[in-house]
Amino acid sequence: MTMKAVRFTVPGAPPVVEEVAIPEPGPGQVLVRIGGAGVCHSDLHVLDHGAMHFQGPFTLGHENAGWVARLGAGVTGLKEGDPVAVFGFWGCGHCHACLQSMEAYCENWESLPNNGGGIGTDGGMAEYMLVPSPRLLIPLGSLAPREAAPLTDAALTPYHAIKRGLHLLTPDATAVVIGVGGLGHMAVQLLRVLCGARIVAVDVDDRKLEHARQLGADLVVNSRNAPEAIETITGFTGRRKAALVLDFVGIQPTLDLAVHLVGRNSQLTVVGVGGGTIPLTQWTLPFGCSVCTPLWGSRAELMEVIALAQSGRIHVDASYFSIEQGPQVLQDLREGKVVGRGVLVPDLV
Ligand code: NAD
Ligand code: ZN
Ligand code: ZN
C-alpha cells in the first residue's frame, strides 16, 4: 500500500510529491492517520539548508495532528480512532530535559537518528505518519485534527517563548511581536490571553498587520521604513520601551529593530531562524536586557495550548490544501502570500 507525500530530497532542491509506502508500526510505535499538517517557515529552512546533519530524502511536516490508526506491539493507553496531536521534537526520552517533557532541549539530540518527523525522518505531509512512542501523542478531545495541527508548533513555540518572559508583562508594560505570520498571529492572541500588557505588532506586509489588529494588537506598525517604525513604537511605549520583544523573523533588519525597541531590564527573544546576529557588549543592549533563543515548547505546554484552543480562547486562522498542493503552498509561504497558517489535509474534498 502506498500514499502521496511531500518530500525533501537534498538541500536546495524543490519539494516533490511522491508515492511512498505506508509504514507499519513496530513494537512501541504508533501509526497516525494525518488529519492536518501545518506548513511552517522552518520547512523552507529544511528545503534550503537541510535538517542539521540528517540526510534526505524524507517526508516534510513537523506540525501534525490526526487519529491513531494502528498500535505497535506493546502500546497501551490509546485506541484506534483517538484524535491526537503529535509532539514534534522527539528527543531521547530519558535525559533530564526529556523527563521534564522538554524534548526540544534533549541533551542527546546530536546522537539521535533524527530529531522528529519532518526534521530528519518522515513527517506528516502524507496520509499516515509513524510516531516512535505514545509519549509523543497528546489527546485532542473535541478539537478537529486539521484545526489543531498548527497548535503543535505555530502556537506552542510562541506560548513557550512568551511564558519565559511572562514575569515582565505587567499591565503597564508593552510586548512587541515582530513578524505576524504563522507563529506571530498566534503570539498576538496568546499575549492577549496570558497577560494585560499592551501589544505592538510589526510586519512589512499590511495584510498581516490588519490581521494582527483584528486578533487584538493595540498598535500595528509597518517596519519597511525602520527609523519611522522606531519613532512610532517608542512614541507609544515612552522611554521605558518594550518589556519583551519577540522576533519571529530573526534576519538582520528585524534584530536591529528589536535592539532599538527593548527597554532596560527587558527580554529580547529570537524565535525566527533568519541568520541575523546581535552584538552583545555592555553597551550594545540596554542594561538588564536578557536575550534568549527558545526552541519549540514542552509537552506540558502543548497540553496547555490545546486547552486554550478547546475553550475558544485562541484559534488558528488556517487555510486548507491537499497534499498535491504542498509544493505550491510552500512557494506561497516563501513569497509571503500566506496569512495565518496553511495546512495540508490528505483527504481534502
Ligand atoms: P511566516 O512566513 O508564516 O511568518 C513570517 C512573518 O514575518 C510574515 O508575516 C512576514 O510578512 C514577516 N516578515 C518577513 N520579513 C519581515 C521583516 N523584514 N520585518 C518584519 N516582518 C517580516 O513564518 P512562521 O512559520 O511564522 O515562522 C517564523 C520563523 O520562526 C521562521 O524563521 C521559522 O523557521 C521560525 N520558527 C522557529 C521555531 C523555534 O522553535 N525557534 C519554531 C517554528 C518556527
Ligand atoms: Zn515549525
Ligand atoms: Zn533527551
Image (tube, rainbow, N blue to C red):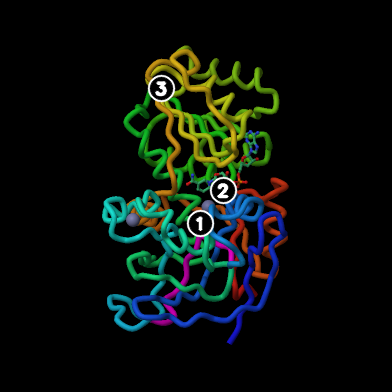
Residue at 58%, 24% in the rendered image: 257
* Disc 2 to disc 3: CB gap under 8 Å: no
Residue 343 part of the magenta segment: no
Residue at 59%, 44% in the rendered image: 181
Main SS class of the magenta portion in the image: strand
| Residues at marks 2 and 3, CA–CA distance in whole angstroms | 27 Å
Q: Residue 39, how many percent across, how many down?
A: 59, 57
Q: Residue 94, how many percent across, how many down?
A: 28, 59
Secondary element at tag 3: loop
Q: Which residue was labeled with disc 2?
A: 182
Q: Is mark 2 within 8 Å of ligand 1?
A: yes
Q: Which residue was labeled with disc 3?
A: 289
Circle 1 crowding by C-alpha within 10 Å: few under 14, some 14–19, many from 20: many
| Amino acid at circle 2 | Gly
* Disc 1 to disc 2: CB gap under 8 Å: yes
Residue at 39%, 41% in the rendered image: 193
Magenta-colored span = 59-71
Q: Residue 267, how many percent across, how many down?
A: 41, 27
Q: Is mark 1 within 8 Å of ligand 1?
A: no
Residue 213's label in the rendered image is: none
Q: Residue 182, how many percent across, how many down?
A: 57, 48
| Residues at marks 1 and 2, CA–CA distance in whole angstroms | 8 Å
| Residues at marks 3 and 1, CA–CA distance in whole angstroms | 31 Å
**Quadrant location, the C terminus:** bottom right
Circle 2 crowding by C-alpha within 10 Å: few under 14, some 14–19, many from 20: many
Determine the image quadrant of residue 69.
Answer: bottom left
Residue at 46%, 18% in the rendered image: 281
Front in this rendered view, residue 73 or 164: 73
Q: Which residue was labeled with disc 1?
A: 150
